[in-house]
Amino acid sequence: MSEDSKEAQRHEMVRRQVQRRGVEDESVLEALRTVPREAFVPESYRGRAYGDSPLPIGEGQTISQPYIVALMADLADLEPDDRVLEIGAGSGYGAAVLGQIAGQVFSVERIPELVERARETIDSLGYDNVEIVEGDGTLGLQEESPFDAIIVTASGPEIPETYRRQLAIGGSIVMPTGARDGGQRLVVCTRTGEEEWKTRDEGFVRFVPLIGEEGWSEGRETGASRPGADEPGF
Ligand code: SAM
């Protein structure tokens, strides 16, 4: 497939899957028109790279549906100079999209095989403002904090206190919270003062679990490898 045709597919993806569902921020739309999603999915799924769904990326994990990547970036309300923390790098696609919108992105991933692949993809595309960090993302990334936004691409029982503390005043956390199985609420938590946070609910979603010290325990990752596992419920 030619580069022109892939670019045309990305434009179509943005029109049909993202704009139609109400995401309007031009910097978010342009980022999704630019980042080649096919580079982040296993070879056998490349033909479906611009489809309206998550796809398996190995290790029981998924690359998020393009719309959900756009929605979370939109809710984070990013500015060009922002420093962003993503938790759950997976394939690295979400981090690459965020890197087109913000100044610097750190993305933490707990599975070493995914870290290696995401780094290779990000490096091969020359996205030098995106760093993939291996570790337990439930602890955030203290040494690089504060962040203007923290985007969590796996679901936890609640927003860890650590994220609230690593957020700059005025910044927001976007995170699916709630039950481990069966769906969660997408929550936006904005730090409005030194000791003040305001939280709002942005609807039903379904994500793979956030596994770690301040998340769920390992060993019961039901649904994690199922395509559709992080589809929004609408
Ligand atoms: N943003 C990714 C992309 O664009 O491909 C999709 C992420 S996938 C839905 C969720 C990811 O969160 C998985 O790769 C999983 O291994 C990771 N994850 C789960 N718990 C984590 C933790 N405590 N720290 C870091 N990553 C974690």
Image (tube, rainbow, N blue to C red):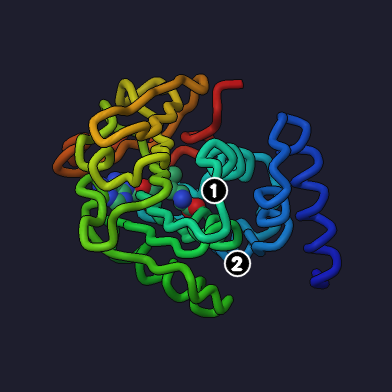
Image position of 35 (left or right of 160)? right
Which residue shows up at 44% across the image and 21% down it?
200
- Residue 46 in view, yes or no: yes
Q: Residue at x 26, y 26 (%)?
A: 157
Amino acid type, callout 2: Ala
Q: Quadrant of the C terminus?
A: top right
Q: Residues within 10 Å of mark 2 (few under 14, many from 20)?
A: some
Residue under the image location 32 percent in, 57 percent down: 109
Seen from the viewer's position, the closer of residues 197 and 120 is 197
Q: Identity of the amino acid at label 1?
A: Leu
Residue at coordinates 67% horizontally, 54% vertically from top-left?
32
Given this view, does label 2 or label 1 mark the residue nearer the observer?
A: 1
At which x and y percent is residue 90?
42, 55
Query: What kind of element bears circle 1?
Result: loop
Residue marked by disc 1: 78
Q: Which residue is mark 2?
A: 39
Residue 50 x/y as whole percent = 70, 51
22 on left or right of 85: right
* Residue 73: % across, % down: 55, 44
Label 2 and label 1: CA atoms lie apart by 24 Å
In the displayed structure, does residue 49 sit left or right of residue 212? right
Q: Quadrant of residue 175?
A: top left
Displayed quadrant of residue 170: top left
Viewer-closest of 201 and 91: 201
Residue placed farthest to the left in the image? 213
Up/down of 94 relative to 175, above or below? below
Labels 2 & 1 near each other (Cβ < 8 A): no
Q: Earlier in the sequence, mark 2 or mark 1?
A: 2
Task: Check disc 2 and report its element: helix, strand or loop.
Answer: helix
